[in-house]
Image: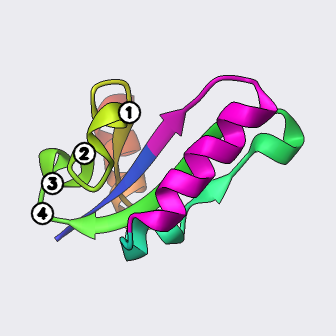
Amino acid sequence: MSKFLIEVTHEDKKAECARVVELFLKTGSHFLKQADWGCMDGEHKAWIIADVGSKEEARYILPPIFRSKAKIISLNKFALDDIEEELHQHHD
């Protein structure tokens, strides 16, 4: 499994915010019900973090209307040893 950040943008209109939030909540998907929203701060996006097998699997979490425009980002963590080695390799 890999971890992905799914970002879904929608129009900057109150009615659109309500429509999208309602759609997410009514799907029954635990992923969509756990979405975080930026609307109250003027950032009309939803973010979901999902542990799934691929970017395409992450995209298919979304209702079809949002799939083509969603931004799917593969997330990873770094260890200090990894970064130090990388810096050492590029320092020479």
Q: Earlier in the sequence, mark 1 or mark 4?
A: 4
Q: CA distance from mark 2 to mark 1?
A: 7 Å
Residue 92, image x and y in percent?
32, 30
Residue 91, image x and y in percent?
39, 31
Name the residue: 51% across, 70% down: 33
**Labelled pair 1, 4 in contact (Cβ < 8 Å):** no
Please tell me the numbered disc located at residue 57: 3
Q: Nearer the viewer, residue 62 or 51?
A: 62
Packing grade of label 3 (10 A; few <14, some 14-19, many >=20) is few
Q: CA distance from mark 2 to mark 4?
A: 11 Å
**Labelled pair 1, 3 in contact (Cβ < 8 Å):** no
Q: SS for tag 3? A: helix
Which stretch is magenta?
7-27
- Whether residue 8 is visible to the viewer of this picture, yes or no, is yes
At label 1, the amino acid type is Ala
**Labelled pair 2, 3 in contact (Cβ < 8 Å):** yes
Asked whether 6 falls inside the magenta stretch, the response is no
